[in-house]
Amino acid sequence: MKVLVTGAAGFLGKKLIQALLTRGQLTDSAGQRHDIQRIVACDRIALSDIQDPRLTVRSGDISDAAFLATLFEEEFDSVFHLAAVVSGQAEQEFELGMTINFDATRQMMEALRQQQRRAKMVITSSVAVFGGSLPAQVPDEQVWRPQSSYGVQKAMNDLLLSDYSRRGWIDGRSLRMPTIVVRPGKPNQAASSFASGIIREPLNGEAARCPVALDTRLWLLSPARAIAALVQGHELNAGALDQGRVINMTGLSVTVEQMIAALRRVAGDGVVEQITFQHDPQVEKIVNSWPGDFHATYAKRLGFSANADFDEIVQEYIAEANIRLPLA
Amino acid sequence: MKVLVTGAAGFLGKKLIQALLTRGQLTDSAGQRHDIQRIVACDRIALSDIQDPRLTVRSGDISDAAFLATLFEEEFDSVFHLAAVVSGQAEQEFELGMTINFDATRQMMEALRQQQRRAKMVITSSVAVFGGSLPAQVPDEQVWRPQSSYGVQKAMNDLLLSDYSRRGWIDGRSLRMPTIVVRPGKPNQAASSFASGIIREPLNGEAARCPVALDTRLWLLSPARAIAALVQGHELNAGALDQGRVINMTGLSVTVEQMIAALRRVAGDGVVEQITFQHDPQVEKIVNSWPGDFHATYAKRLGFSANADFDEIVQEYIAEANIRLPLA
């Protein structure tokens, strides 16, 4: 198997590549399991911190047609397309969001179509495709009504991936991901960035600001579960995808208050005191337009699973970041 | 008001232009009613059979960037964008469908955005955005799961029009039209072409072939109602659009058997004998993926209405086509 990973230098990209290298095998669209011979890790910034003879690093802009053409001079059996402009930035910079989130994805599908290998393509969609008046728990049959350009771009990808798959040009799967928490590193321009920040910063002895109300309900998945879902989504046999190529993923429904209570249980009162509250109407407007709970019936039937509780998610981050409790 | 109509030489385009010229006024996005000073009628083939000093005919390909640029050298207050590649052709010719149905629509929205007049833009969407497992009567909250490239392209337009409207760049409305029956003229490549043909051809003394089963349920609207809906959809105040810019239109839910029974009631047994049945699996597959009945709750609340029964639709065609009953 020859595998392309975009957004490879990102947090999920790196984790996915490590998981694929460890796993060593993947199943192709004909249902045959093969060794992974080669992973091309593509990002704007070259991935630098994974060494493996099977790994080739490419750096470039996937919205640059010339770069994309050279990238696809090589044939791929599988693509994990993770590169994206995050929600907040796609809202601020409309053209950039359209170009990276939609046009580049479309061009990649087209490049795979031209290769005529019916490559598997895993993309990530988002709860941001939903909005407007919503039931407390969103069913798989819920109409898409995005309230952000990011959500629109992701929904358009979902539609096009489904059509390319229906036509047999690719074997696509779109995993509609919950907010992935706790991300390591610094805050980013995602409207959901705070959901990691209010856990990560206090655990690193830093102040964190929460821009939304305590009763804000979020739909979450931990990084480890997200990586497992990407691999599982890839491995599913196309014949099992009887409700289409777009899967509302399993997740954990919690309020910000419940997140903070879990942090308190796991790490103590002192840690929680690092969190202050300051409403940010722009962030609130976007985050409140996303549903906080899903049935995810199709995903459960396909065998996807979520975190048992938020304590598990906090503990996963503590273990991952080598944080020693109790904190001083 | 300066108005652009695309697909102007088509059946609906001509009727719309006649209706607008007769009406003489439209309401702009600020809610002000103005005289229609000018209608630019754009199509690949020049519209030739309407004469009015307010009318200017342009012929060209809206997927040609240079043509589009000259078209939008002029500023418009309103655009009725009807030009499209029909469902059957968009399925046969994927690139053509993407280029005309999606890319050209996107470029028109962008041209209007650049004009910074927050023009009203009315587009037509389709029941083809729905598919898969569906309830007998489709609610407004039903997820989009198109089973054709045409449906995908229309759904992507709906998403993008909503985003451009949310951002205040245009004042868009997408009317998700039922199958419009009875169209005059010849059969076309639309998968739904037969739905007009089985009424039109017998009334014109010609044989018609029905490619689907008698119990096939269709969601229909007559041409006169469709034109009224386009104007009404344009006139609605943006403030009333509290469930978004995409409206599942009101229609009439009937089976092919009920359509033929109405034709028999209105025009007699001899006319109905012109219809023969021969299954076409390709047409059936597409048509059966479309829902045959909708709640259309939002549309009803906004004041849209449908035909009372199919007899009315048959009679509308008979009057329109100057057919004299009883037929010989």
Image: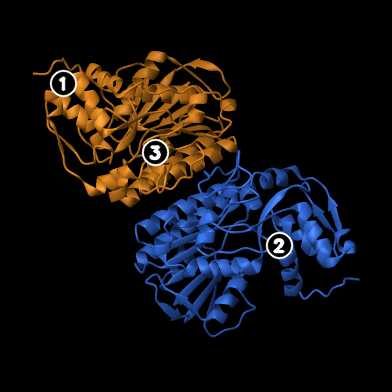
Chain colours: A orange, B blue
Q: Which residue is mark 2?
A: B309
Q: Which of marks 3 and 1 precedes in the sequence? A: 3
Q: Residue at x 34, y 46 (%)?
A: A97
**Residue kind at label 2, given as amino acid type:** Asp
> In front here: B19 or B241?
B241
Q: Residue at x 37, y 14 (%)?
A: A22
Labels 3 and 2 in the same subunit:
no
Q: CA distance from mark 3 to mark 2?
A: 41 Å
Q: CA distance from mark 2 to mark 1?
A: 69 Å
Disc 3, disc 2: CB below 8 Å? no
- For label 2, the SS is loop
Q: Say left or right for B72 vs B168.
A: right
Identify whether A95 is placed above or below B228: above
Where residue B99 appears, as percent x and y from the top left, is 53, 53
Residue A306 lies in quadrant: top left
Q: Which residue is mark 3?
A: A127
Q: Which residue is mark 1?
A: A268
Q: Say left or right for B151 vs A108.
A: right
- For label 1, the SS is loop
Looking at the image, can residue B226 be seen?
yes
**Residue kind at label 1, given as amino acid type:** Gly
Where residue A108 appears, as percent x and y from the top left, is 45, 38
